[in-house]
Amino acid sequence: VVSRGFHLDPALLAVAAEEKIAVFRTPMITMKFINAATIALEVDFSPTVTEFGSMADILGVGVLIRGASGIGKSECVLGLIERGYSLVADDVTRITSLEGRELMATAPELTRNHMEVRGIGIINVANIFGIGSIRIEKRLDLVVTLKEWQELEAVDRIGLDQEFYEILGLQVPHVTIPVRPGRDIARLIEVAAMDQKLKGLGQNSALEFNTKLLNLMEPRST
């Protein structure tokens, strides 16, 4: 690659052609090209996995919504979009590990900007809700698993024990939300994302409540 838009000597071009070596030219200075090429190659050759779940951007928190087929993942994302949040991927999400430090999620090119809504069919989210309702990619910050209430042996009611979901060797915060008729699951996922955002800022509501409770239970000196 020849930087700064310089032209190679015709003799060198002839040798490259004879040896079947590709020659490219860029107007970028050398350092900027090296940086840009490094980032591009890192993305293209980073480990990638496919997760069967829907991905949404909720208040800047990237949330992957998992669950059995037909449990209502797409309907939840649709409800989140109606609240002003953004779709990243529906049903199938491609996740890439960048330098083993963070996970980036996106949709396969074929399904990008589209959702399958049972009873309606395939819809173009950007056309219906506007360009602000979609994102090309988003960092993965939280995994939410939807499960039928009767499938759970116990339901966490306090949230002291943080669960994690492993993807490509990285641990992602994970919550399980019980599903049953009458529950506003989209709203619960929204609250889970808000709570995760607070935890990222160092505020753990469950831990703070537990500390207050323990202080209240301590015997007071007379």
Image (cartoon, rainbow, N blue to C red):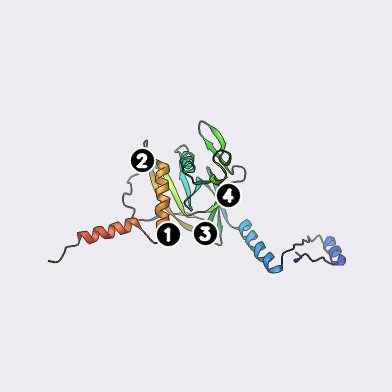
Residue stretch in magenta: 149-153
Q: What residue type is labelled 1?
A: Gly
Residue at 81%, 59% (x, y): give it. 20
Q: Is residue 150 magenta?
A: yes
Kindly indicate whether the residue at mark 3 contacts the one at mark 2 (C-beta within 8 angstroms). Answer: no
Q: Is the magenta stretch mostly helix, strand or loop?
A: helix
Does the residue at mark 2 contact the one at mark 1 (Cβ under 8 Å)?
no
- Of the residues shown, which amino acid type is indicated by label 4? Ile
Comparing 126 with 164, the one in front is 126
Label 4 or label 2, whichever lies nearer to me, is: 4
Count neighbours of disc 4 (C-alpha within 10 A) and say few if under 14, some if 14 to 19, many if 20 or more. some
User: Which residue is disc 4 drawn over?
Assistant: 136
* Residue 88 visible in rendering: no
Q: Earlier in the sequence, mark 3 or mark 1?
A: 3
Q: Which mark is residue 149?
A: 2
- Secondary element type, mark 1: helix
Residue at 56% across, 35% down: 122
